[in-house]
Image (cartoon, helix red, strand yellow):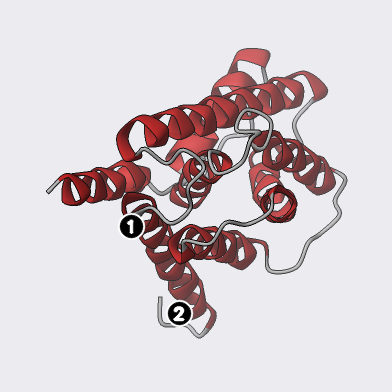
Amino acid sequence: MIVFKRGVAAAFFTVLASSAYAHHPMGGETPSTFSAGLLSGIGHPIIGLDHLAFIIAVGIAATLTRHRFAMPLFFIGATVLGTLVHLAALGLPFVEVMVALSVAVLGIMLLSGRAYAPAAYAAVFALAGLFHGHAYGEAVFGAETTPVLAYLAGFAATQYLIAIGAGLAATALFATGRTADNVALRISGGVVAGVGALLVGEHLLAAIGLA
């Protein structure tokens, strides 16, 4: 019964990400002030299902290492870099598909019950961060420097707080304790992987004109 409750909690905790699925908290308008940029940055990681699911998974995965407070920085730093890449008008291939795939991949890693090296998590976080950040960049493309800097600060802080909060909640609710072979943890990974698979499927259907 305890395992079941933890599994339900894991699933519920993860699918909080499904509260919304959007990619621009300012209604499609490019931020023109510091406050607008900051609010847009704070909101973007929260209202995007793909981003939020991945950030939560980052926080949970980080608890499986000895660097739970530092590991999310690989993802966050890469999202900042990815945004700057977009603002420099440098393209990355299949951004939205890669974002969706990253959610599925990290979910599968958690679902597997295997103990991966911190370097493996760091690599996944950093690579995924470039694509997530490139997607973030669309919201401020063409904006002035001040709102862009506020936007970067806003989404960086929000992502870190979500990741750390997810990790602390996972430790308290699921008793992860750096143990990858944990039923509740694996259920959580399965939910994340499922979200990623649905997002990938959505993009594939859109590509062939069925969505």
Determine crowd level at label 1: few under 14, some 14-19, many 20+ residues with C-alpha closer than 10 A.
many
* Residue 1 place in picture, x, y as percent: 12, 49
Q: Is residue 23 above or below residue 99?
A: above
Which residue type does callout 2 highlight? Leu
- The image's mark for residue 187 is 1
In the image, taking residue 80 as reference, residue 26 lies left or right, namely: left
Q: Assign a secondary structure to mark 1.
A: helix
Q: Are marks 1 and 2 in contact (CB under 8 Å)?
A: no
Residue furthest out toward the bottom: 208
Q: Which residue is mark 2?
A: 205
Relative image position of residue 28 (x, y in whole percent): 54, 40
- The answer to whether residue 140 is visible is yes
Image vertical order of residue 23 relative to residue 153, above or below: below
- Nearer-the-camera pick, 80 or 34: 80
Q: Secondary structure at mark 2?
A: helix
Residue occupying image coordinates x 64% and y 43%: 136
Determine the residue positioned at 54% across, 79% down. 207
Counting every numbered tag in the picture gives 2
Residue 191 lies, with reference to residue 163, above or below; the image says below
Quarter-of-image position of residue 168 = top left
Calculate the distance from the C-alpha at mark 1 to the C-alpha at mark 2: 27 Å
Residue 26 in view = no
What x and y, as percent, mark residue 62?
58, 40
